[in-house]
């Protein structure tokens, strides 16, 4: 089913289309020109702008309500920056931010010296178990009642600020089932998430928003490189990859748990030398995730070896 909404900007002088063109270039997403309109394609969704003599009509269509609302909010923000205020036929004013779900923390389990596994339950947990692996955990400041992001009358999402601002780290759904999902937190110094999980959050309500980000690349030969923060994503890809997979992980044997016995996994002391030593083959995809500096170096290295953008992923998982 396709979800749709329509908006209108009056008294436009071309600024809306210019802003959309600029955004498409920044995000490296297609902007196509069809008969009477300009189509912006993102998140499997489409926003079409139809200019006329008195303004611009905006039509959004999307396979999911949350993606439609996300695009509606994002376009509202973009046009408001140009002092254009779209009026939408429908706005879910007061609703939780698009893609946000409230979950109960039902268990916290020490999995290894470095990892803690958290299980969440909620009626729509299942949608976090699909092809997009990641979500943002929304952690309220300690001692403050939660104040969740909500959709405003304009269509934009308003995030709590100041003392109510939420900590929003990204995590990976490592296991899921009907009404539940699990994720693994790699604990480290100075981490608000590690502090939160150490405070025994079982029984509390927590927000998560998503899913988003990547899933398993569809490749005959998949080479995975990552540090501890990438272990949950690598675990998923080892389970789901359609072809051959090899993983090179910078983590202790204890923290790899059952992956330590997987013949496809090698423990490495440093990711970049392991990447440089990789013998590439035909029909391969190289996936790399770790510290931002390492991800940047990996991107430079893979590009210098002639890999095209579509043949590799180099993601900054922390900085
Ligand atoms: C797509 C994606 C998926 C991810 N999935 C997971 C996951 O499943 N499990 C997981 O544990 N992490 C995962 N991460 C990484 C996680 O989001 C970061 O480690 C994040 O920084 C954790 O937030 P924080 O509470 O530590 O707060 P932040 O404010 O982000 O960080 C606090 C401090 O900790 C430092 N820091 C952050 N990560 C590390 C680290 N690994 N080692 C040492 N110091 C660090 C930061 O530099 C900063 O000084 C993922 C990241 C991305 C982008």
Image (cartoon, helix red, strand yellow):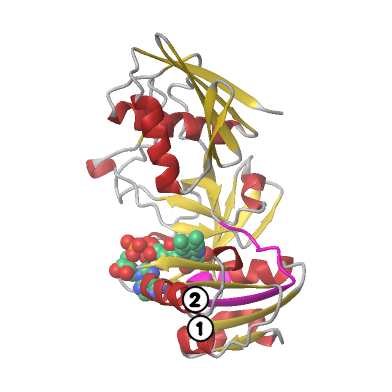
Residue at 61%, 63% in the rendered image: 174
Residue at 39%, 52% in the rendered image: 168
* Cβ–Cβ under 8 Å for marks 1 and 2: yes
Magenta range is: 214-232
On screen, 42 above or below 177? above
Q: Position of residue 261 (x, y in %)?
A: 69, 86
Query: What secondary structure is marked by label 2?
Result: helix
Of 277 and 34, nearer the camera is 34
- Quarter of the rendering occupied by the N terminus: top right
Mark 2: give few (<14), some (14-19) or many (20+) Cα within 10 Å: many
Of 62 and 268, nearer the camera is 62
Q: Position of residue 99 (x, y in %)?
A: 53, 39
Q: Is mark 2 within 8 Å of ligand 1?
A: yes
- Quarter of the rendering occupied by the C terminus: bottom left
Q: Which residue is mark 1?
A: 251
Q: Which residue is mark 2?
A: 228
Q: Position of residue 285 (x, y in %)?
A: 63, 71
């Amino acid at each position: 089913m396709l979800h749709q909404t329509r908006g209108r900007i009056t008294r436009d002088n071309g600024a809306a289309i210019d802003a959309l063109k600029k955004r498409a270039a920044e995000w490296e997403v297609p902007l196509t020109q069809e008969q009477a309109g300009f189509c912006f394609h993102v998140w499997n969704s489409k926003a079409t702008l139809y200019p006329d003599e008195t303004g611009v009509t905006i039509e959004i269509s999307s396979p999911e309500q949350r993606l439609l609302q996300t695009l509606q909010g994002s376009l509202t923000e973009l046009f408001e920056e140009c002092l254009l205020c779209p009026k939408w036929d429908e706005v879910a004013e007061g609703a939780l931010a698009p893609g946000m779900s409230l979950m109960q923390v039902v268990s916290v389990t020490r999995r290894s010296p470095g990892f803690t596994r958290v299980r969440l339950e909620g009626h729509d947990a299942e949608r976090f178990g699909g092809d997009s692996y990641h979500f943002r955990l929304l952690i309220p400041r300690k001692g403050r009642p939660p104040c969740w992001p909500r959709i405003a009358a304009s269509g934009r999402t308003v995030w709590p600020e100041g003392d109510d601002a939420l900590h929003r780290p990204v995590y990976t759904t490592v296991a899921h089932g009907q009404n539940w999902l699990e994720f693994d937190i790699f604990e480290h110094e100075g981490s608000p998430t590690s502090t939160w999980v150490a405070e025994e959050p079982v029984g509390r309500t927590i927000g998560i928003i998503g899913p988003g980000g990547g899933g398993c690349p569809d490749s005959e030969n998949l080479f995975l490189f990552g540090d501890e923060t990438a272990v949950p994503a690598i675990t998923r890809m080892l389970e789901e990859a359609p072809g051959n997979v090899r993983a090179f992980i910078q983590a202790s044997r204890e923290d790899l748990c059952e992956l330590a016995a997987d013949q496809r996994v090698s423990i490495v002391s440093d990711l970049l030398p392991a990447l440089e030593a990789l013998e590439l083959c035909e029909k391969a995809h190289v996936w790399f995730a770790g510290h931002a500096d390492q991800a940047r170096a990996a991107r430079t290295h893979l590009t210098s070896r002639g890999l095209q953008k579509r043949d590799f992923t180099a993601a900054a998982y922390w900085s």
